[in-house]
């Protein structure tokens, strides 16, 4: 019986890397050992985490500024510790979020023109984690929602507009990856304890749990359409694997396959319009691509692209930034060890120069479906789709503004060092009541006459002391004191919980000793 090859319009996808002068060269790429992509791109800019002394920094370049990057090129340098992850906002191409070892998440407004000096002041400073923040992820359809994961084993859902944490989720171990589903109502995480968990976004409730891969090395997960999750990881024999899961039943995978025996972590990139998954391994020189369908075995191997240089990091261009006239279906920005950011477009071979409807269905645009408050109140969050037939023209966006609100997750050292933000609300000192002296009538000889009504006795004078600063705000001081009290209470509850666990552990140990003696 003759073998029939499966038909696919993506079987002959090919890559055509740009010349060196059309790429970005001489970049001091971060040497961090964290399993991060170190690169993020959108239709306007490419951002790359760089190596910096005395703090953290990342480089932001307009897509048109190709070629050699000067060593003293201005960067975004507001972090006091190394930057670990960066992500562009899907609804505003001038807004980027970053996180790092200084335990903060910062949101930046990037001007359209090239930076002329280092950018040091973020528009939003999100402080709630107790230890370094490893990963961040923007909500796909709700405006100004960011999910962050830290080394304190916590996930925090932030409202960037108010700088407050809306939902807090405690994990049993370190988070290794996270991904929202299509409308952002759920997200999936992988942890160091080898477990994959699915959470409800608005409440933080865990909806399911499974073990995607047996190996101890880091696993990655990405949410697909139709309630499926694609994971990459390692077997007990340290073989690299991928697996496809139905979120309704995480006990058994729909399909699991061995890729090879290399040891680099594989990052999955998903194109929801074409249902293609691209696998890019850290330290690899190969990019593999697969197509996910409803036919068994569900994940179909298509092809691979291989170069001589291994990749240190990688970023994927959103569909809005592709050239539809040349049938470009994706574009990667590969960070190489020699300081080069290589631009790697992928094409589907087509003879016709007309717009290809099957390659470019309507895709999520840069208009949010709802605000953060509307989403948390239960509003529908299906992304608003746009057509790429006439090319993408970004809508004009207002500058991001954030208003700092009191947050019970602030830490004492952060409260003490928090700087005033130009986007904060006016000082409450402006609303203090102003006391006026009562008018006094004068007699003909200049002596002041007593008023007709009896006046209340003057309040006692406060003892002389050091003068308060002109901008002193007692209300802000009371807010800080209240936050500190809440933090102290949280620590007391934590101490009590640990003491109870210690007592229980001692009791169990005592019972085991008694049993052995008997």
Image (cartoon, rainbow, N blue to C red):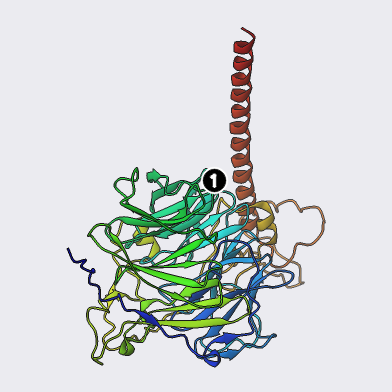
Q: Nearer the viewer, residue 466 or 334?
A: 334
Q: Nearer the viewer, residue 56 or 288?
A: 288
The picture places residue 319, in percent across and down from the top left corner, at 36, 78
Q: Residue at x 73, y 73 (%)?
A: 444
Q: In the image, 1: left or right of 150? A: left
Q: Residue at x 47, y 68 (%)?
A: 280
The picture places residue 352, in percent across and down from the top left corner, at 23, 91
Q: Nearer the viewer, residue 196 or 377?
A: 196
For residue 427, what is the image quadrant? bottom right
Q: In the image, 310: left or right of 366? A: right
Secondary structure beneath label 1: loop
* Residue 301 appears in the rendering: yes
| Residue at the extreme front of the image, as rendered | 1
Q: In the image, 232: left or right of 486? A: left
The residue at which mark 1 appears reads as: 173
The picture places residue 156, in percent across and down from the top left corner, at 50, 54
């Amino acid at each position: 019986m003759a073998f029939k090859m499966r038909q696919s319009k993506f079987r002959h996808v090919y890559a055509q890397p740009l010349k060196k002068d059309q790429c970005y060269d001489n970049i001091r790429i971060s040497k961090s050992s964290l399993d991060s992509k170190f690169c993020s791109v959108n239709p306007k800019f490419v951002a790359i985490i760089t190596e910096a002394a005395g703090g953290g920094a990342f480089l932001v370049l307009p897509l048109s500024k190709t070629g050699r990057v000067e060593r003293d090129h201005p960067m975004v340098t507001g972090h006091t510790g190394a930057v670990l992850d960066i992500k562009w906002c899907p609804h505003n191409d001038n807004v980027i979020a970053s996180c790092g070892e200084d335990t903060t998440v910062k949101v930046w407004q990037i001007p359209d023109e090239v930076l002329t000096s280092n950018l040091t002041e973020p528009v939003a400073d999100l402080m709630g984690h107790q230890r370094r923040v490893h990963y961040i992820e923007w909500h796909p359809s709700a405006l100004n929602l960011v999910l962050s994961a830290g080394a304190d084993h916590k996930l925090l859902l932030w409202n960037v507009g108010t700088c407050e944490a809306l939902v807090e989720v405690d994990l049993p171990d370190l988070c290794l990856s996270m991904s929202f589903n299509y409308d952002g109502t759920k997200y999936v995480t992988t942890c160091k304890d080898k477990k994959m968990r699915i959470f409800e976004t608005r409440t933080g409730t865990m909806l399911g749990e499974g073990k995607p891969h047996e190996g101890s090395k880091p696993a990655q997960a990405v949410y697909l359409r139709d309630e499926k999750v694609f994971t990459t990881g390692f077997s007990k024999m340290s073989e690299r694997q991928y697996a496809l899961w139905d979120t309704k039943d995480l006990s058994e995978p729909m399909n699991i396959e061995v890729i090879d025996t290399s040891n680099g972590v594989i990052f999955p990139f998903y194109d929801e319009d074409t249902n293609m998954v691209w696998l890019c391994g850290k330290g690899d020189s190969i990019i593999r691509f697969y197509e996910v369908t409803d036919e068994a075995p569900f994940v179909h191997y298509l092809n691979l692209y291989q170069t001589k240089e291994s990749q240190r990091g990688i970023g994927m261009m959103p569909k809005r930034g592709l050239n539809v006239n040349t049938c470009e279906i994706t574009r990667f920005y590969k960070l190489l060890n020699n300081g080069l950011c290589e631009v790697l477009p992928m094409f589907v071979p087509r003879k016709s120069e007309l717009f290809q409807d099957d390659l470019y269905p309507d895709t999520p645009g840069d208009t949010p479906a709802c605000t953060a408050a509307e989403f948390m109140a239960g509003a529908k969050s299906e992304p608003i789709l746009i057509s790429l037939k006439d090319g993408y023209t970004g809508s004009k966006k207002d500058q991001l503004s954030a208003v700092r609100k009191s947050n019970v997750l602030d830490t004492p050292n952060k409260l003490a060092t928090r700087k005033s933000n130009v986007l904060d609300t006016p000082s409450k000192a402006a609303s203090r009541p102003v006391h006026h002296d009562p008018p006094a009538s004068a007699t003909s000889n200049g002596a002041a006459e007593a008023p007709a009504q009896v006046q209340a006795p003057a309040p006692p004078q406060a003892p002389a002391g050091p003068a308060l600063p002109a901008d002193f705000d007692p209300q802000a001081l009371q807010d800080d004191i209240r936050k500190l009290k809440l933090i102290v209470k949280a620590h007391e509850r934590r101490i009590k919980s640990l003491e109870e666990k210690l007592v229980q552990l001692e009791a169990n140990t005592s019972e085991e000793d008694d049993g052995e003696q008997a």
